Amino acid sequence: MTGRRQETLARDARMSEMAERGMTALEIAGAENVSRCTVYNWARECGKALQKHPSQTSNASNLRAEKMASMYRQGVTLQKIADQHDITRERVRQILKSVGITAQEGGASVVSAAKSAARAQAREAKSMAKYGLPSAVVQQLRKDGVLSAYRSQRAHAAIRAIEWNLTFQQWFAIWQSSGKLHLRGRGKGKYVMSRVSDSGCYELGNVHIQLATENSREAVRVWMGKTKPNKGVYCLYPGRELAWFARAGKKPLGFFATEAEAVAARVAFFQTNPGALTRSTGCGYAHIKAQKGRSERFQVMVGKKYVGSYTTPEAALAARAAYLEAFAQQGAAVEAKPTQAA
């Protein structure tokens, strides 16, 4: 064995002993006056594990942990971090836990929170654009039935062929200013949104909140002193295919496409059911059927004036005609008195 070979074996023995004592590559290199690269190559050939310098290990570990924590906080999953650093997913979790990072602070939790925030922001933007109100307020109004009330009134206006120029925010503001929103509805003691004089379109400046009973009286005043061309026939749904409604007294006859069809249906009904004639038919008397020991009769009313009851339609009509003639003569006499006195 040559001297160089013996020297190499002796050095390897010394380096092996120093490695077993836990010396680092830097310390061994200094003791043997060789480079650290030589020490690392020797350790790799001999299968020796060298102790790393504490500061060196700490710095590398800290840098890696900081990078992992940063990636995790930005929403990168444990598996993707593990794949990049060529370690297991569980090891990444342990490293993050050692620096105080929990599952709720990153990864899928961050991605989920970001998506939820984006959805909430989009929901708020949509609510403000559509209703002019925050989403939470709109949700409460929907729960309270206010949104459905707005849509119902708007749809009913469309059915009646009345122009609607109120946004939900405007409609809601009018109700809020009135302080009667909680009393909205039909019937005694309830309030409705009505048009001024029951004319024009639904728009700011032409609508107000009032009692439902007062709104009904206004609708009646529109027809006061006027005569409907066809009694018992109504145009309920302008613009629809079956817009006209007909009824005989309290009996509904259905919906029809034209006014003429509704009138014809009503005439046909009374021809088939002559006993159904009532004062509302315009024949001049009310047909009251026999009941509870009382015989059939035909009652005559002129306005609120009771003229009498008769056994036949002909007698009722004759009595009505006589009353109207007498009333007309009385009115003419009253008009002539001032002229005679003069």
Image: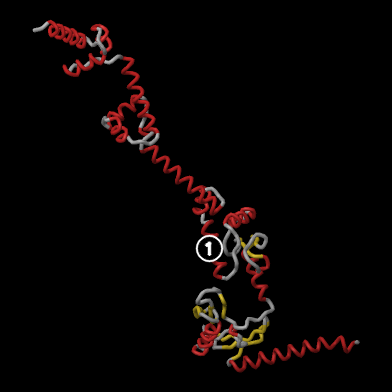
Categorize mark 1 by other alpha carbons within 10 Å: few (<14), some (14-19), many (20+).
few
Q: Tally the numbered discs.
A: 1
Q: In this view, does 306 lie above or below 169?
A: below
Position of 247 compared to 26: left or right?
right
Q: Provide the residue designation for mark 1.
A: 152
Q: Which residue is located at x 12 percent, y 5 percent?
A: 3
Residue nearest the observer in this picture, 324 or 233: 233
Give the amino acid at mark 1: Ser
Position of 44 compared to 302: left or right?
left
The image quadrant where one finds the N terminus is top left
The image quadrant where one finds the C terminus is bottom right
Outermost left residue: 1
Residue 95, how many percent across, how many down?
Answer: 32, 26
Outermost right residue: 342
Q: Is mark 1 on a helix, strand or loop?
A: helix
What is the basis of the colouring in this image? Answer: secondary structure
Give the image quarter of residue 13: top left
Residue 304, how many percent across, how many down?
Answer: 67, 80
Q: Does the image show residue 196? A: yes
Residue nearest the observer in this picture, 307 or 211: 211
Residue nearest the observer in this picture, 159 or 302: 159
Residue 153, how many percent across, how many down?
Answer: 56, 63
Give the image quarter of residue 184: bottom right
Q: Does the image show residue 189? A: no
Q: Which residue is located at x 49 percent, y 89 percent?
A: 272
Residue 120, how many percent across, how many down?
Answer: 47, 45
Position of 232 compared to 119: left or right?
right
Q: In this view, does 63 lie above or below 130?
A: above
Q: Which residue is located at x 52 percent, y 74 percent?
A: 240
Give the image quarter of residue 56: top left
Residue nearest the observer in this picture, 136 or 178: 136
